[in-house]
Amino acid sequence: MKSILLPFLQFDENKHDRVVPPSGFTAQLSLLTSGAMAFLAVFAMALSFATGRLADQWGSELARASTVRISAPDDQVAAQTQAALDVLRTTPGIAFAEALSDEDERALLEPWFGPSLPIENLPLPVLIEVRETAEGYDAEGLRLRLAGEVPGAVLDDHSRWRLPLVKAADRLRILGLLSLVLIAAVTAGMITLAANAALAANGQVVRVLRLVGSTDTYIARAFVRRFTVRGFTGAVVGTFFGVVAISLLPDANVEGGFLTGLGFQGAQWLWPCIIPLLAAIVAYAATRVAATQALRRLM
């Protein structure tokens, strides 16, 4: 039997992956899965980088910034403002303290109320911008001193709302990394299903190959090579379209806030290049496990 089949089943060792069907449902499934998952991975990676930048920005810009708010009768505002400035400028750990002008307060309120806000007719408190040194200052001690010398002054060191924002950004970054892990797991699962389907559909071919002397290692290598190439090719296409989509997003700017800074910056544009390589590694590992198990069942 073997001698009869050998003339019709001559396999070139360099082309041994031809035992895997080059097209069909399994090829389409593996290519589509790799492409779609790579496309999503680009966005997950961009989200992780963007939230990391946001956390660093909020942490660095707000950590050393504080505000003193003075609410007092009109005839005492100037005196209490000067007293507060004297206290702040003599407090260890404070590098800068300056009262905001009407123009500064108007600029702060303009995004919310528009440029025509009659700020001079509103009973707004006086705001003093405070910048601390790298060593920082004793917030509780400063509050007690202000309470004793400037009754109308209230210190806000931004910690009540800065820390939750930084924590939220850090958690979003973790979610972005977790999304990459889940994407890799889904890719591995879908490629495993595709490899199992291909092996099951070609069970008769596998039996004939065994009959003419092919080892399971040879057969498994054929499926692993073909599905690894499919996974890599699909991921290249998906990564390309993902990078194009990210590049079309608006650039980061102050007015747009977080939603305009979701793209990559600088050398971060090189990171998506590793997605096809990771997809190929995942496809290789998943197909190798699937092929080994499927060949055992076809014994």
Image: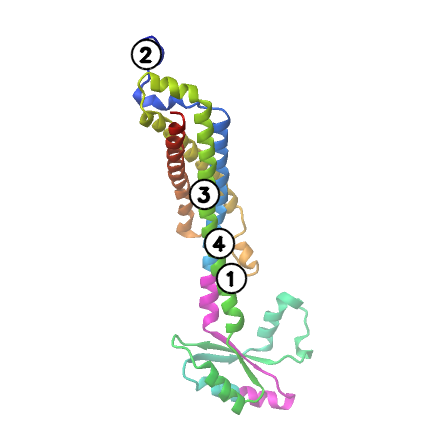
Q: Nearer the viewer, mark 1 or mark 2?
A: 2
Comparing 205 with 237, the one in front is 205
Q: Amino acid at mark 4?
A: Leu
Q: Which numbered marker is on residue 175?
A: 4
- Looking at the image, tell me whether mark 4 or mark 2 is earlier in sequence order: 2
Residue at the extreme top: 4
What's the CA distance linking mark 4 and mark 3?
15 Å
Disc 1 from disc 2: Cα separation: 67 Å
Which residues, given as a range, are shown in magenta?
Answer: 54-82
Q: Quadrant of the N terminus?
A: top left
Q: Residue at 45% across / 58% down in the picture?
A: 52
Q: Is residue 121 left or right of residue 195?
A: right
**How crowded is the residue under tag 4: few (<14 C-alpha within 10 Å), some, or many (20+)?**
some
Is the C-beta separation of discs 4 and 1 under 8 Å? no
In the rendered image, residue 234, in percent from the top left (x then y), is placed at 46, 34
User: Number of numbered discs present?
Assistant: 4
Q: Read off the residue under disc 2.
A: 2
Quadrant of the image containing the C terminus: top left
Q: Amino acid at mark 1?
A: Ala
Residue 223 vs 45, above or below: the answer is above
Question: Alpha-carbon distance for marks 2 and 3?
Answer: 42 Å
Which of the two discs, 4 and 1, labels the residue nearer the N terminus?
A: 1
Tell whether 19 sits left or right of 67: left
Mark 4 or mark 3, which is nearer to you?
Answer: 3
Please name which of the two marks, 1 or 3, marks the residue nearer to the observer: 3
Of the two numbered discs 4 and 3 on the same chain, state the one appearing first in sequence: 4
In front of the other: 51 or 69: 51
